[in-house]
Amino acid sequence: MKKRLLALFFTFIAAVIAVYFLFSPPIEEHQPKVATPQQTRSVNPIADTDPVTPHKKPKSEPHTTQNHIESLQLGTQSKVIADAYAKEITFPPYSKPLSIQDKGLLKPNHFVPVSFPLKNGDSLSLALSKFRFIFPEPIQFTLHSSNDDHHSATVELVNSIKNEILLTQPLSLTQGSGQTTIAGDQAWPTELILKVSINELSSKQPITALFQYVSPVAEIVSVDERYPDEADIVIPVSLDVTKAGLYRLRANLYSQKNQPIAILTGQEKLDQGIQTLPLKVHKSVLNNHEGPYELTTFQLEKRSASPGELTEYGTSQQDSYVIESIALSLLSDEPYQPSENELKRLQFLEKMAESP
């Protein structure tokens, strides 16, 4: 029975891993975590036997009962995943609904502030304005110390691969806080480390943050007039491409009341020069929003052609573009039909949920 339960468990874990990539839009490399002092965890073992007295039989539950409970839990979890995926594939992969709860999709380039405790009981926090900067953007960041007596700091920018200091500059603090910018350099490597140390501390313990600085390989120059195509609104996006390759563009669509509607994804092989990469909005995500709309939060990537090649990035001339209204009556009511692969994955998950 144990072997059977273990087999079910590992199969369930494999399903979770597989479905992770199905639910997530093909989004972005995540922000690397910055090492912080390790925290100690304690493990509290749970006793599973009762004391025995001469006049009382020891309580004992059949071993199969526990196995049955665990099997039911695995089955319930599998059913939750299957039901969620069944709902997910009612929308096409290029046009997924978006809500205010999808914080990672609404701000995909968000930098998570780094906190660092000092030996004397104080603490530091470091926050960059974003995780990935695109040349010629300046690097903007804020340092905060819990000690108002800290008045100055030293900033170092380091090549994370060669551990080479690229620049050093001072930072003035007012009541323990300070913010500044660093002018970008196109010659910098992609992976950089920002190190900031408080000058008043004898130990000079630095707080560090890993981020990216990239040179653009394409630029969004305009968004052309939208038009209906069966159940989709097609939005042609014009790009000026400096490096040919396979490009993926993602953007968020908002209503005129600034409510998120959908995340749109398009992918095309593009040559150098002015090219068009269309985005499509499926009628199923619009919820009767006829527009006008706002297209924003652009993520333009040149996909790696081989495992050793890094993803490269593009930018946009504008932060957002207005998409004019369109009569939804011009769009077909035909629902999205899941692909053969999507249906096979759903069948696999449903079988997992039905397993005893």
Image (cartoon, rainbow, N blue to C red):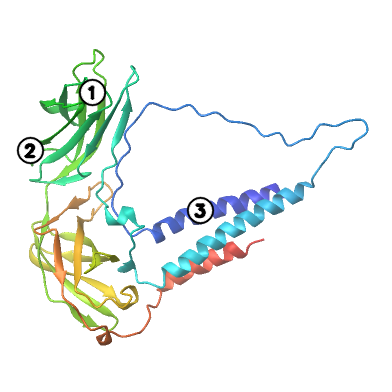
Task: Give the residue number, with chain letter if any, for mark 1.
Answer: 148
> Which residue shows up at 46% across the image and 65% down it?
85
* Mark 2 or 1, nearer chain start: 1
Relative vertical location of residue 234 with respect to residue 122 in this rendering, above or below: below
Q: Is residue 56 above or below residue 287?
A: above
Which of marks 1 and 3 precedes in the sequence? Answer: 3
Q: Of the residues tagged 2 and 1, which is closer to the observer? A: 1
Q: Quadrant of the C terminus?
A: bottom right
Q: Secondary structure at mark 3?
A: helix
Q: Which mark is residue 14?
A: 3
Camera-nearest label, 3 or 2 = 2
Q: Nearer the viewer, mark 3 or mark 1?
A: 1
Q: Considering only order in the chain, which callout, 2 or 3, is on the residue closer to the N terminus?
A: 3
Q: CA distance from mark 3 to mark 1?
A: 50 Å
Q: Residue at x 44, y 28 (%)?
A: 39
Question: Could you say where residue 209 lies in the image, as x and y percent from the top left?
Answer: 25, 34
Mark 1 is on which residue type? Asp
Q: CA distance from mark 2 to mark 1?
A: 28 Å
Hey, which quadrant is residue 113 in on the image?
Answer: top left
| Viewer-closest of 325 and 41 | 325
**Left/right of residue 84 with respect to residue 296 in the rendered view:** right
**Disc 1 crowd, CA 10 A, few/some/many (<14, 14-19, 20+):** few
Check the image and report above or below for 355 versus 136: below
The residue under label 2 is: 183
How many residues crowd mark 3 within 10 Å: few (<14), some (14–19), many (20+)?
few
- The amino acid on which the numbered mark 2 sits, given as a three-letter code, is Ala
